[in-house]
């Protein structure tokens, strides 16, 4: 959300833009590593109360960020934001899965995931737009207002839900040892790159024999394409055979 706000934020707090960029990294790290830890620590907490605490902490963190007078204060707010977001997301998914009927469970999970995805997709441009018009602090205040609305909705509409047993930290981390999982997490774009390279090789192979006139033998090719670098000259003899 704050990527587009870094220049103005850095100038206001008296730090370099590269230093301000650490605010993004800190949020991501505490979100990723704090989520499984907090899920284990709060496994015995009633679900509605857990959602209320996490969204209230998220609201508080945004208010702290909006009123930050130093970079360290804003960094602390980002740490709290990452932890609260990491606590809320799995709690919301667990609540939706347990609350919905079996035949509607997929739809309930899709609504939660869709809401999170929409917030991530629209949050950055909207946050930048608001920050450009009203200042970066207004962006955090706007998110705090949205969190307050969500807090009221949770407190008013959601029923209480008893805590349920969950996986231990060891069981959660053991998933990483599954063959291919760790590699996929570290190199998530490897499959996409491999597919792109395969497409490029296929295009090169299709260019080996250019389109010929109806009366021209299929094995003949236009040498001008070699001179233009479309087809490597090392393949000339192979193609003409």
Image (cartoon, grey):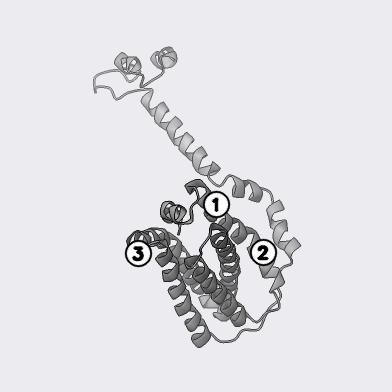
| Disc with the residue nearer the chain's start (2 vs 1) | 1
Task: Give the percent coordinates (x, y) of residue 1.
Answer: 45, 59
Q: Residues within 10 Å of mark 1 (few under 14, many from 20)?
A: some
Q: Which of the pair 82/184 is nearer the observer? A: 82
Residue identifier under label 1: 22
Residue at 67% over, 69% down? 39
As drawn, the label of residue 37 is none
Task: Please identify the quarter of the rendering in which residue 166 is found.
Answer: bottom right
Q: Residues within 10 Å of mark 3 (few under 14, many from 20)?
A: few
| Disc with the residue nearer the chain's start (3 vs 2) | 2
Between label 2 and label 1, give the one nearer the viewer.
1
Residue at 50% over, 69% down? 62
Task: Give the percent coordinates (x, y) of residue 66.
Answer: 47, 67
* Label 2: which secondary element: helix
Q: Which of the pair 231/85 is nearer the observer? A: 85
Residue identifier under label 2: 36
Residue at 44% over, 56% down? 12
As drawn, the label of residue 134 is 3
């Amino acid at each position: 959300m704050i990527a587009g706000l870094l220049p103005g934020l850095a100038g206001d707090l008296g730090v370099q833009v590269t230093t301000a960029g650490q605010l993004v990294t800190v949020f991501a790290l505490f979100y990723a590593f704090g989520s499984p830890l907090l899920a284990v620590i709060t496994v015995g907490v009633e679900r509605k109360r857990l959602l209320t605490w996490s969204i209230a902490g998220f609201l508080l963190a945004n208010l702290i960020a909006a009123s930050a007078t130093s970079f360290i204060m804003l960094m602390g707010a980002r740490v709290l934001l990452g932890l609260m977001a990491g606590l809320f997301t799995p709690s919301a998914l667990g609540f939706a899965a347990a609350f919905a009927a079996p035949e509607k469970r997929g739809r309930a999970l899709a609504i939660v995931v869709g809401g999170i995805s929409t917030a991530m997709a629209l949050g950055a441009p909207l946050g930048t737009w608001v920050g450009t018009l009203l200042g970066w602090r207004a962006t955090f205040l706007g998110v705090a207002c949205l969190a307050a609305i969500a807090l009221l909705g949770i407190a008013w509409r959601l029923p209480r839900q008893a805590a349920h047993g969950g996986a231990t930290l060891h069981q959660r981390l053991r998933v990483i040892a599954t063959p291919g999982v760790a590699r996929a997490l570290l190199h998530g774009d490897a499959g996409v790159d491999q597919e792109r390279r395969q497409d490029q090789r296929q295009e090169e192979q299709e260019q080996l024999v250019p389109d010929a006139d109806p009366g021209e033998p299929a094995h003949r090719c236009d040498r001008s394409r070699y001179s233009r670098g479309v087809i490597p000259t090392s393949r000339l003899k192979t193609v003409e055979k």
